[in-house]
């Protein structure tokens, strides 16, 4: 139901020959943030992470369920009036973490409550320069009566933030088909525009349960019309939680959960398109691993150049511990499973680490209703070859690197490089 990917730009040359950077460590359930005992259940949820372009700095964020008042007792000491989005930092590839910023609602008086997503601009958009960090989040009042996807910007690598614009406004924040909320923002840059995807229940005729859509902007201030990405002509179907990655061929992969799938539950589906703006014209394909397992709920995906000549598509789901791998550019019959030490987590996120694309970070914020949730990271070694043999080369850094001694990305899409 709730949901959110990093879009990656292609690199035409190998990593610099000046020496390989230090390999990121393998980590198992390292704590990013463990809430105080008085936090409201589920304490934390919906964790996300990113790597700053041309930097070893990692940033993490999540839904932060602060202490609140209830009919039996007053709000605990230091209880904020409204929820905020925390930003934490790591300078050692995830071994240790500390607070970098708190992002507060600056316009609604509701708080930033659900579904944060971080993105670094790798080219200029309007008056905002490459290297600007963006945070999209769902601003929701305490009574959950409205939903509003707002965008904030930071021009100092995430230490301070300012409201930029609002993209979409919807109804009550409950996943019921007769309500009209908006959910789960995700961002990427494509052909000079910022694209923001989200799940949309605002159907005035009640002919759709939920669909996935996007809107684009050339200045971060004004947003274009709503464009469908995945919709089904069935009032009970609920595709949701869009996450998109660029593949080395220039194609794009979208993963989503699909209530209404013939496989049952919220089976994980994907679509592949030659443009991240035309997924609605492509068929939905279920992920059906060779071992017969069933990925279900709140998926996330990334692509890494490691793992063979086509690199590897890596998908996580919300109900199972393994990752799902495809080393054949998304071929339907090429999905396998990889057991990992990280536990299952609602919309568990993935990050390809900057210094070594064979190292994948799994970012977990806990489970729905979890009484002991905390934010944890685990890293796994995808392959021993460290990406050798990949005929497409490595990903390209974008324009955000210009002030940091790197080159400009050449692909049509823009995202975080290595």
Image: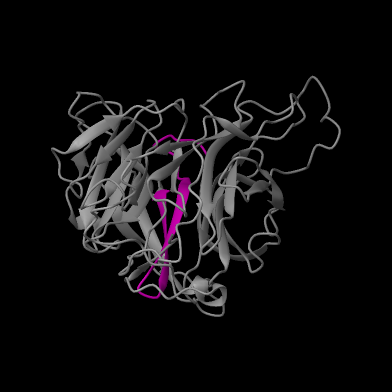
Q: How many marks?
A: 0
Q: Which residues are magenta?
A: 173-199
Q: Which residue occupies the extreme right position in the image?
A: 77
- Give the image quarter of residue 347: top left
Position of the N terminus, as image quadrant, is top left
Nearest the eye: 174 or 113: 113
Q: Residue at x 37, y 33 (%)?
A: 317
Q: Residue at x 47, y 32 (%)?
A: 346
Whether residue 254 appears in this view of the structure is yes
Residue 329: where, in percent of width, then height?
Answer: 20, 50
Q: Is residue 196 above or below residue 411?
A: above
Q: Is residue 339 magenta?
A: no
Q: Residue at x 34, y 74 (%)?
A: 410
On the rendered structure, is 203 left or right of 109? left
Residue 340: where, in percent of width, then height?
Answer: 39, 28
Nearest the eye: 1 or 304: 304
Nearest the eye: 170 or 362: 362
Q: Is residue 3 above or below residue 91?
A: above
On the rendered structure, is 197 left or right of 38? left
- Give the image quarter of residue 64: top right
Nearest the eye: 14 or 329: 14
Q: Which residue occupies the extreme bottom position in the image?
A: 127
- Give the image quarter of residue 81: top right
Whether residue 208 appears in this view of the structure is no
Q: Residue at x 51, y 71 (%)?
A: 400
Q: Is residue 179 magenta?
A: yes
């Amino acid at each position: 139901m709730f949901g959110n990917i990093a879009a990656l730009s292609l690199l035409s040359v190998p990593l610099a020959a000046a020496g390989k950077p230090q390999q990121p460590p393998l980590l198992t359930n390292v704590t990013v943030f463990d809430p105080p005992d008085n936090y409201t259940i589920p304490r934390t949820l919906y964790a996300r992470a990113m790597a700053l372009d041309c930097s070893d700095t990692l940033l993490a964020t999540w839904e932060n369920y602060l202490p609140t008042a209830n009919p039996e007792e007053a709000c605990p000491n230091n209880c904020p009036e409204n929820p905020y989005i925390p930003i934490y930092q790591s300078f050692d590839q995830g071994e240790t973490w500390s607070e970098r910023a708190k992002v507060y609602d600056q316009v609604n008086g509701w708080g930033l409550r659900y579904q944060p997503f971080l993105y670094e601009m790798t080219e200029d958009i309007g008056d905002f320069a490459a290297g600007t960090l963006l945070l999209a989040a769902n601003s929701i009042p305490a009574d959950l009566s409205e939903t509003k996807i707002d965008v904030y910007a930071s021009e100092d690598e995430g230490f301070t933030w300012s409201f930029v614009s609002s993209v979409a406004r919807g109804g009550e924040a409950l996943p019921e088909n007769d309500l009209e909320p908006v959910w789960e923002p995700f961002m990427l840059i494509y052909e000079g525009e910022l694209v923001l995807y989200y799940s949309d229940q605002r159907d005035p005729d009640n002919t759709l349960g939920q669909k996935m859509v996007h809107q684009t902007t050339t200045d971060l201030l004004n947003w274009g019309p709503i464009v469908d990405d995945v919709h089904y002509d069935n009032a009970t179907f609920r595709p949701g939680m869009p996450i998109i990655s660029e593949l080395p061929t220039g194609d794009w992969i979208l993963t989503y959960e699909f209530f209404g799938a013939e496989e049952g539950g919220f089976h994980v589906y994907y679509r592949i398109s030659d443009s991240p703006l035309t997924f609605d014209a492509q068929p939905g394909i279920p992920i059906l691993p060779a071992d017969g397992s069933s990925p279900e709920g709140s998926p996330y995906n990334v692509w890494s150049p490691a793992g063979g000549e086509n690199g590897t598509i890596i998908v996580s789901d919300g109900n199972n511990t393994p990752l799902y791998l495809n080393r054949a550019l998304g071929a339907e019959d090429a999905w396998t499973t990889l057991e990992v030490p990280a536990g299952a987590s609602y919309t568990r996120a993935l990050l390809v680490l900057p210094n070594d694309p064979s190292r994948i970070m799994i970012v977990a914020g806990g489970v729905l209703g979890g009484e002991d949730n905390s934010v944890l990271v685990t890293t796994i070694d995808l392959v021993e070859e460290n990406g050798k043999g990949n005929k497409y080369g490595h990903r390209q850094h974008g324009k955000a690197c210009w002030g940091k001694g790197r080159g400009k990305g050449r692909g049509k899409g823009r995202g975080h490089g290595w």
